[in-house]
Image (cartoon, rainbow, N blue to C red):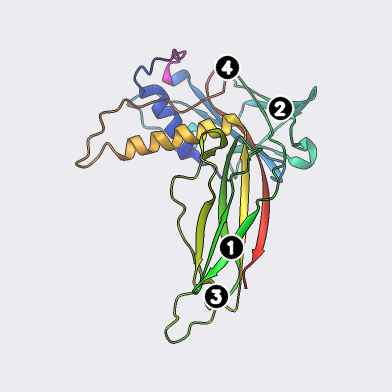
Amino acid sequence: MKYLLSAVVLMLHFWVTSCNSGVEIERIAPENLVAVSSFISPQDSVVRVYVYQGKALGEIARSDAAVISDAKVTIEEEGVRHSLVFEAVSKSYVLSNQILKVTPSRYYTLEVITRSGLVLTAACRVPPTPESLLLEGEKEGNDFAFGFLWPEKIPFFTFSFDLKNVIFTPKLGASTGPYLGFVTGGNLYETATQPPKPLENKVFNAFLAETVSLQTTLYSLDRNAFQYLKTKTDAYNWSANTSGFIPNLREPQPVFSNVQGGVGIFGAYNQIVNLTKIK
């Protein structure tokens, strides 16, 4: 799961320009605003924290100029504080997961101190490792139709599908190999609000291949990650609906932030990968 500068710029934009949503939010002058972005997971080899400087409205902010490279960034777990080092290539503060050892169900706190003395803090708890999805499928013509039930023990989740080990030789009347159908209804799920019916999809032309397997990755999200991703998606949809001939009369809402002293996200996820051989 990769989150680039555009995500943080979107957060800065909607945090600064959002109208009153009925929730009192501490206002910070844009030029004094610092944004932090970090997602931690037991499966990642490196822990990364991105730190950016806001700009006053009307100013041109280049991505390179927005990066803060001289902050003091630490993550604490069970009383042990680890310092992260700035990496110029990725423009982020990094630490090997061999040192930090992000662990399921453990609580972590992030602290960022800028050269000007601003202090930003945030906390998250890594979700437990999810159980494997019970995926059931059957042959429908040349397609593989499959589905799985909602993972009841995971409050917030998302998932992805990928085709692996595909060997396909085009033939007369069968020039297109296996491909995945689209999952309708979005890609972020909250178990408490979803109906207990299977999620369904298809691998089209699966049985035209010599071999093909379906890889399913289930991501269990903590509440911070879920709320951030959901409100970020809502903000993107709002922005996309303001141009052309479709005026958007809804008020923009701020992207979720759990960072004290600034804006941003410090969230966690845990994942499990399953490989289902189709043919």
Relative placement, left or right, of 8 versus 103 is left
Q: Name the residue under label 1.
A: 137
The residue at 39%/38% (across/down) is 236
Please provide percent x and percent y for residue 101: 78, 38
The residue at 53%/46% (across/down) is 197
Q: How many labels does the image show?
A: 4
Q: Mark 4 points at which residue?
A: 118
147, above or below 219, in the image = below
Q: Count residues near mark 2 (Cα–Cα under 10 Å), then give few for <14, some for 14-19, many for 20+.
A: many
Q: Name the residue under label 2.
A: 108
Q: Which of the two discs, 3 and 1, labels the residue nearer the N terminus?
A: 1
Q: Which of the two discs, 1 and 2, labels the residue nearer the N terminus?
A: 2
Three-letter amino acid code at the position of disc 2: Tyr
224 or 1: which is nearer to us?
Answer: 224
Which quadrant is the C terminus positioned in?
Answer: bottom right
Mark 1, secondary structure of its residue:
strand
Q: Distance between the residues labelled 1 and 2?
A: 39 Å
47, above or below 276, in the image = above
Three-letter amino acid code at the position of disc 4: Leu
Q: Which of the two discs, 3 and 2, labels the residue nearer the N terminus?
A: 2
| Quadrant of the rendered image containing residue 213 | bottom right
Q: Mark 3 points at which residue?
A: 207
